[in-house]
Amino acid sequence: MKKTIATVAIMTALSTSAFAGNFDNTTGKITLKSDDFSLSLSAPETGADQLSVTVPTKHVDITGSYLRNGSIDDYQIKVGKDVNILTTPVYVGNQAKYGFGDSTTKDTLTIEPHIGVSTTYNKFTPFAEVGYSWKALSGSFTNFDRDASYMEIGTAYAVTEKFSLKASITDTRDKDFDNGDKEATIGAVIKF
């Protein structure tokens, strides 16, 4: 019972500020995960619903996503991987995203390196991550321009061996670290 109360208290503390006036969106997310693939569904308060399938491999994770916002259909193919730095809680990673669909006049290629820290305390795994992205448009994929930056903080809680909860807040900024857009994500991961 104490663990349940602690979980509810932490999830409430993280999610309560998401409903403050300076937060633009709150997203619910559920992920079904096996050793061979994962399937996730995200439903933000506003914006595009997203269905993603991820296939992990030894050297890179490959994700295909379908995004739908009203009658607008977009697609994204993402490859990337995180690597732990020796025996520290620090990790680094990079993602390359190729996006296309109805909402853009040109296809986009985005490169997004990031660094983070994550460690497990009992059943909690708090984390913090920062990243920066560069984007190129179709027709000039060798000409990358600075695009955006972000910071994400949150925690996951392992309720059981096969079920965990996760709450995070992401502050997305423009290329000069201005004009913040805060979003809270509350989700569940089910392993099968």
Image: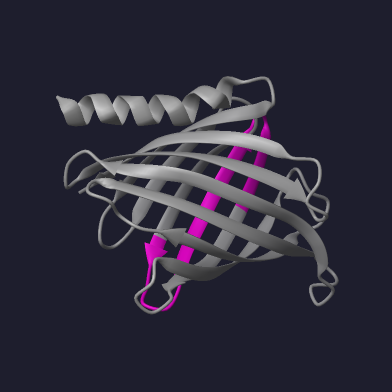
Is 73 included in the stretch rendered in magenta? yes
Front residue (pair 51, 155): 155
Q: Residue at x 65, y 28 (%)?
A: 23
Q: How many numbered marks does the figure carry?
A: 0
Residue 70 visible to the viewer: no
Front residue (pair 106, 10): 10
Residue 190 visible to the viewer: yes
The N terminus - image quarter: top left
Residue 75 in percent (x, y) is at 61, 51
Residue 8 in percent (x, y) is at 31, 25
Front residue (pair 66, 171): 171
Q: Which residues are magenta?
A: 55-75
- Please determine whether, in this image, residue 101 is positioned above or below residue 109: above
- Please determine whether, in this image, residue 50 is positioned above or below residue 137: above
Is 42 included in the stretch rendered in magenta? no
Q: Residue at x 46, y 31 (%)?
A: 14
- Please determine whether, in this image, residue 34 is positioned above or below residue 25: below
The quadrant where residue 9 appears: top left
Front residue (pair 3, 32): 3
Q: Residue at x 84, y 74 (%)?
A: 143
Residue 175 in percent (x, y) is at 80, 56
Describe the colour scheme in one phrase.
one colour
Residue 170 in percent (x, y) is at 59, 43
The quadrant where residue 158 appears: top left
* Magenta stretch prevailing secondary structure: strand
